């Protein structure tokens, strides 16, 4: 069984999983019932305004209350907090019953605001709970399950909400929302006790001051802050599509409530599939290289929704039975599903990265800050919808096109100023699509603090393969002439690669390299070197040069030996002496990476490291058919 599904067998995850699933499910039963009621029972000229107003009021509490909620989530025990939040949900659903009974759209929109307040309280607890109960290699799977179940609950809640509101009776939908709120409370009672992250926190009841303090707190960790901005942009993008699908169905496709359900179903299935794919594609690790893949997919398929809308020429009323038989219907459905799939690939690694990189005891407050900025972006998205559709009188497909263009501009800017995302994409592609990298001992690399990695050198892509598997960002030392090669130079700069030359070749570059290594280690970074000083030309390991001893003498840090195998003979090695003769050999081959235990700095010598790496090579399980010997050379 996949490790992410195995979590469902454990009490530390299952009750929490069911509680958040039932909460999201209930939200969407109510929201979809309300949105469909507005779309099909309110005067046409008021639909756009009310739809966007409802959506904006649901997310406004995230902006108002998230900072305070983050403090509470870090200060108090989380299982009791979740139970109290679920009791509040029951109260809100009882008010919703009154709104349905009175057929009061105003009261129901107020209930939507209260639901947003309840969700804003639950969010920091939810994402703060996961890193406290799951290990690092479970975070991707756990987050994937949560994101997938959230959108499956959107799917099921959307379907049920549409069905119940179509019955033309207030009692079924009223009974459903109260019942599911009660079930959520019962599952919350089974969540195991979770000690507070920091009980010393003093609550700031001034909402404005707490919000500003939280926003100032976020940028202190650059990686986490950029991940928050990436998540916030996804919710801007996604909220535009989700908010407009009901009215898009009515005005563009000329469909009924059941067609709305079909389109939302395709989107939700996509998010679920994309989220669950993350663990498989990332190898159970936080892989931000998937983020650019998701961004590109979002752009391509959202653009096609616009063109598919232009091509839609059918004007007859669409119901479930004839919609899927109409030309262009499957194109729109597949576009929405693919938007969901790539959305899952985009957002799950970012959530996991926030939880992994946030300072211990601060996760809930970071998530609260994330929710504040998410809410701000979503409010802007709602305002954009109201301006484009209401003020300017443009069509929903035009709104989708404008959103797609903004997405391309924003992501291009982000990936330009933060090239690490694209760098990780290259590394992920190399270790996942070109080679199948088997690894052992990665936990031997310290999770924090300075460390020097040493490895044998078989091919030009060794640093990229190591970068794709080592969990911490690593700065590699590289021969300066390779560093200066045109097309690869931006990539090497993005990786903060350190160029080096031999003492006889250019002593200034060599000294600058040692100074850069020293500075990186003093900044608690990971530095990777290949002590042979050059690629192997015959498949055998060469002796380690004494430069490694100088590094440790100047900056005493632990040294972790590593060994790569089965790259000899590939097009990136020097198996073929002439560049012209090299061909794509050993694509999709199994490559093995073995990591040894850290060596204390006072024991480090070049000879010892050579023997350690050689011993790791002897543990290799993958034979190299291109070696003339029975054992692989390097």
Image (spheres, rainbow, N blue to C red):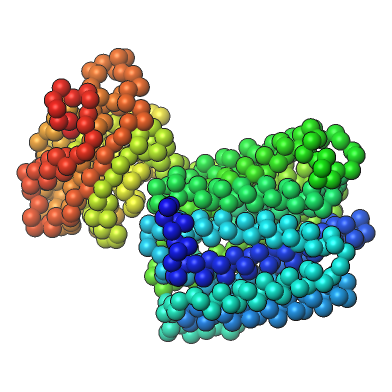
Coordinates of residue 110 in the picture (x, y in percent): 78, 74
Q: Residue at x 85, y 62 (%)?
A: 167
Q: Is residue 93 left or right of residue 138?
A: right
In the picture shown, does residue 224 fall above or below 591? below
**In the rendered image, which quarter is residue 88 located in?**
bottom right
Coordinates of residue 532 in the picture (x, y in percent): 15, 36
Residue 399 visible to an observer of this rendering = yes
Q: Quadrant of the C terminus?
A: top left
Coordinates of residue 43 in the picture (x, y in percent): 93, 59
Closer to the camera in the image, 632 or 524: 632
Q: Is residue 319 left or right of residue 601?
A: right
Residue 286 visible to an observer of this rendering = no
Coordinates of residue 286 in the picture (x, y in percent): 42, 53
Closer to the camera in the image, 290 or 565: 565
In the picture shown, does residue 615 fall above or below 82? above
Q: Is residue 620 left or right of residue 314?
A: left
Q: Residue at x 84, y 45 (%)?
A: 319
Q: Residue at x 82, y 53 (%)?
A: 257
Q: Residue at x 91, y 55 (%)?
A: 44
**In the rendered image, which quarter is residue 619 located in?**
top left
């Amino acid at each position: 069984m996949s490790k992410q599904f195995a979590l469902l067998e454990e009490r530390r995850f299952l009750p929490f999983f069911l509680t958040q699933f039932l909460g999201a499910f209930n939200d969407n039963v109510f929201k979809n019932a309300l949105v469909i009621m507005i779309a099909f029972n309110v005067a046409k000229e008021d639909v756009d305004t009310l739809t966007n107003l409802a959506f904006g009021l649901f997310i406004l509490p995230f902006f108002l209350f998230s900072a305070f909620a983050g403090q509470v989530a870090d200060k108090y025990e989380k299982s009791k907090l979740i139970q109290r939040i679920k009791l509040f949900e029951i109260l809100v659903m009882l008010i919703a019953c009154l709104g349905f009974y009175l057929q009061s759209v105003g009261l129901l929109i107020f209930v939507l605001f209260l639901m947003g307040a309840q969700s804003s309280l639950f969010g920091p607890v939810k994402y703060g709970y996961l890193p406290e109960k799951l290990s690092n290699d479970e975070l991707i799977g756990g987050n994937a399950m949560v994101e997938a179940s959230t959108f499956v609950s959107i799917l099921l809640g959307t379907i049920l909400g549409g069905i119940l509101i179509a019955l033309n009776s207030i009692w079924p939908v009223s009974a459903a929302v109260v019942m599911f709120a009660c079930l959520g409370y019962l599952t919350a009672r089974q969540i195991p006790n979770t000690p507070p992250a920091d009980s010393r926190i003093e609550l700031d009841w001034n909402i404005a001051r707490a919000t500003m303090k939280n926003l100032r707190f976020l940028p202190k960790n650059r990686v986490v802050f950029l991940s928050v901005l990436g998540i916030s942009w996804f919710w801007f993008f996604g909220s535009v599509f989700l908010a407009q699908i009901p009215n898009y169905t009515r005005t563009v496709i000329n469909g009924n409530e059941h067609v709305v359900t079909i389109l939302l179903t395709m989107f939700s299935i996509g998010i679920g599939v994309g989220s669950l794919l993350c663990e498989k594609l990332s190898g159970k690790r936080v892989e931000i290289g998937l983020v650019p893949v998701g961004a590109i997919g979002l752009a391509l398929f959202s653009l096609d929704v616009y063109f598919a809308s232009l091509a839609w020429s059918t004007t007859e009323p669409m119901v479930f039975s004839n919609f899927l038989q109409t030309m262009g219907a499957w194109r729109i459905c597949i576009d929405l599903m693919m938007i969901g799939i790539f959305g899952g690939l985009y957002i799950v690694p970012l959530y996991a990265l926030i939880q992994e990189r946030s300072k211990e005891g601060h996760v809930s407050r970071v998530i609260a800050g994330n929710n504040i900025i998410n809410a701000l972006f979503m409010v802007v998205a709602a305002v954009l919808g109201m301006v484009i559709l209401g003020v300017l009188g443009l069509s929903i497909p035009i709104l989708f096109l404008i959103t797609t263009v903004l997405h391309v501009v924003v992501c291009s800017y982000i990936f330009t100023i933060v090239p690490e995302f694209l760098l990780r994409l290259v590394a992920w592609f190399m270790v996942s699509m070109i080679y199948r990298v088997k690894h052992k001992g990665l936990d031997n690399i310290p999770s924090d603090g300075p460390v020097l990695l040493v490895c044998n050198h078989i091919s030009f892509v060794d640093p990229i393969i190591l970068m794709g598997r080592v969990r911490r960002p690593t700065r590699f030392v590289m021969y300066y002439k390779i560093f200066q090669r045109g097309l690869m130079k931006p990539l090497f700069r993005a990786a903060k690669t350190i160029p080096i030359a031999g003492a006889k070749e250019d002593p200034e570059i060599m000294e600058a390299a040692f100074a850069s290594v020293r500075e990186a280690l003093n900044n608690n970074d990971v530095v990777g070197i290949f002590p042979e000083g050059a690629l192997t030309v015959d498949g055998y390991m060469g002796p380690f040069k004494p430069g490694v001893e100088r590094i440790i003498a100047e900056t005493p840090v632990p040294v972790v030996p590593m060994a790569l195998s089965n790259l000899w003979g590939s097009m990136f090695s020097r198996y073929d002496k002439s560049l012209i003769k090299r061909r794509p050999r050993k694509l999709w081959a199994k490559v093995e990476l073995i990591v040894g235990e850290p060596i204390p700095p006072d024991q480090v010598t070049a000879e010892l490291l050579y023997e350690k790496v050689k011993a790791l090579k002897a543990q290799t399980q993958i034979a190299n058919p291109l070696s003339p010997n029975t054992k692989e050379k390097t």
